[in-house]
Structures are given as C-alpha cells and as structure tokens.
Amino acid sequence: MARAISPCIFCQIAGSSNSTPLLHSDDKVVAFKDINPSAFRHYLVVPVEHIPTVNDLQRRNEDYTLVSHMINVGETLLRRDAPQPNQYRFGFHQPPFNSVDHLHLHCFALPFIPRWKQLKYVFGTTWWVY
Ligand SMILES: [Zn+2]
Ligand SMILES: [Zn+2]
C-alpha cells in the first residue's frame, strides 16, 4: 500500500525497530498490550503484513489461517492472565470505525471498563465463516 507519508504505527511495532514490549511475535503476527486498556485485560494482535481492514481480507485459506492464528495467539495470552474463557471477547473494527488502518484483533478479558463503547467493534468472527 502506498501511503508512505506517515509510517504505520503497527508496522513499526511489528518491525524490528520498536520500543513496545511484545507479548508474542512470530513470522505472521505480533501481540502487545493496548496502551489504553478497555477491559480487565486488553491485548492487540496484529499481522506483520500490512492489511488495512477486515474488508481487505478475502475468503481464502491463507486469510482464514491468519485470522485463526490471531485468535489463537490472543486466547493463549488471555489464558495466561485471566482464568475464565467465558469472559473472553475478540473483535475487529468494522470499517469505517478503525482506530488504526492496520488490521488488528482486540482481545479482551471481561469485565469491560464501564465507559467503554462496545459498539465500535464487531464481536465474533462470522464475517469469515463460509
Ligand atoms: Zn501497517
Ligand atoms: Zn483498535
């Protein structure tokens, strides 16, 4: 994507020259804490590759695998810190409500911090169910 003027913050975090402590990194995704947590636990999982929004994903195996991997990583991290899987929530932004134009999965362990606006998010992942 040629939006070269302002470097993408998440690409920077996923790149080698970042100061954000990573909770997880592999060749596909990195994970870190949301700087502005909205719940008891709030992590972000982002693909290393720059994918702008969920609308840029396609219903093909590669993307399906990537999203499953993002959710797996998020779940593993939550499980480390929050014992109750029924309190976990995962969501992507629904365009145009993106905070950052680089696909990222929000991973929460409830409870939400009360002022939180849940409606900004798409909960569940039905968009990629065949
Ligand atoms: Zn990016
Ligand atoms: Zn976000």
Image (cartoon, helix red, strand yellow):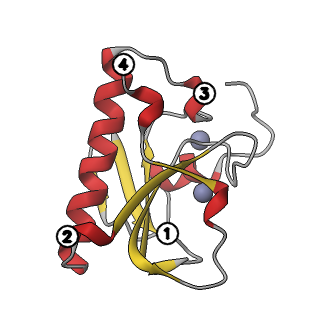
For badge 4, the amino acid type reads Tyr
Q: How dense is the environment of label 4, judged by Cα within 10 Å: few (below 14), some, or many (20 and up)?
A: few
Amino acid type of the residue that numbered disc 3 sits on in the rendered structure: Asn
In the image, which disc is placed on residue 55? 3
Q: Earlier in the sequence, mark 1 or mark 3?
A: 1
Residue at x 26%, y 46% (from the top left corner)? 26
Looking at the image, which residue sits at the far right?
5
Circle 1 is placed at which residue position?
19
Q: Nearer the viewer, mark 2 or mark 1?
A: 2
Answer with mark 4 or mark 3, whichever residue precedes in sequence.
Answer: 3
Q: What distance separates the C-alpha of mark 2 from that of mark 1?
A: 25 Å
Q: Residue at x 49, y 69 (%)?
A: 19
> Crowding at label 1, few (<14), some or many (≥20) Cα neighbours within 10 Å?
few
Q: Which is more foreground, mark 2 or mark 4?
A: 4
In depth, the one of 54 and 3 nearer the eye is 54
Ligand 1, image quadrant it occupies: top right
CB contact under 8 Å: marks 3 and 2: no
The quadrant where residue 24 appears? bottom left
Mark 2, secondary structure of its residue: helix
Q: Residue at left 55%, top 77%? A: 38
Q: Which residue is mark 4?
A: 130
Upstream in sequence: badge 3 or badge 2: 3
Which residue carries the number 2 mark?
79
Res. 29 image quadrant: top left
| Quadrant of the frame with the N terminus | top right
Q: Position of residue 130 (x, y in %)?
A: 36, 19
First in sequence: mark 2 or mark 1? 1
Q: Is residue 27 visible?
A: no
